[in-house]
Amino acid sequence: MSTQSLPPTERLQQLLPQLFEPVETSGERYLECQLTPELTAILPLRWVQQSKVVPATLITPIPLMPPSFLGLLESQNQVIGVVQLSHLFELSQERSSLRQYPLIIIRLDSLSRPPSNDGYISNDGQFVGLAVHKITRLVNYPSGRLQPMNAQADYDIDSSLLKGIIPIADGSERLVLDMVAIANRIQRLRLVNA
């Protein structure tokens, strides 16, 4: 039978069967991002509420706030604080003035308790936007690959905000963000009501 005579869905299924086969994934899913153009990190996807790119004009700056605080953003009928993650890690002293910001929105109050049975957080609570240089992709790493930070590691970064590193096959490493430590640091900045 010719694929031309089939309905579009069946035709697609016949031409690209791999798209319709379930993919087995093991380990934990992470969102990979760049804190700076040179430094890549990952955070567990279960803590991510949303990721998006936001025009800088939608972020309202607030005077007399710490340099890591970019301002406030209205998103889905909520006002959330936006923090520049590179400043939080003390990687940059300059205030970023981009035309748009890649944001990872996390729920702060979910970080003090485990996620639900499905492994993800619900969508009610206090949120904060983490502005990063770039959101790159979703990745899967097998459980048990997390290693502690090496004291001799060549990173000039505040390691108190890291869980450790995951070595990659190409010889590089991914920094694993400690979301609880980041949430605590943000709350100490008094950007949200704790």
Image (cartoon, rainbow, N blue to C red):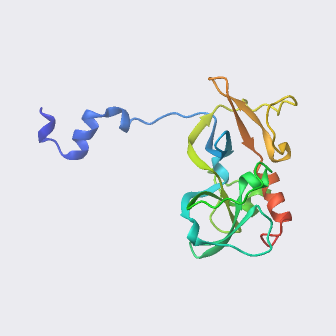
* Residue 72 sits in quarter: bottom right
Name the residue rendered at 67%, 70% in the picture. Answer: 80
178 horizontally vs 169: left or right: right
**Count of numbered labels shown in the rendering:** 0
Q: Nearer the viewer, residue 169 or 89?
A: 89
Q: Is residue 131 above or below residue 154?
A: below
* Residue 191 sits in quarter: bottom right
Q: Nearer the viewer, residue 47 or 96?
A: 96
| Residue 75 in view in this figure | no
Name the residue rendered at 56%, 42% in the picture. Answer: 138
User: What is the x, y in percent for residue 15?
Assistant: 25, 33
User: What is the x, y in percent for residue 161?
Assistant: 81, 47
- Quarter of the figure with the N terminus: top left
| Residue 191 in view in this figure | yes
- Quarter of the figure with the C terminus: bottom right
User: What is the x, y in percent for residue 57?
Assistant: 56, 71
Q: Nearer the viewer, residue 147 or 12?
A: 147
User: What is the x, y in percent for residue 2?
Assistant: 12, 33
Q: Is residue 125 above or below residue 103?
A: below
158 horizontally vs 168: left or right: right
169 horizontally vs 63: left or right: left
Q: Is residue 154 above or below residue 81?
A: above
* Residue 56 sits in quarter: bottom right
Name the residue rendered at 79%, 70% in the picture. Answer: 65
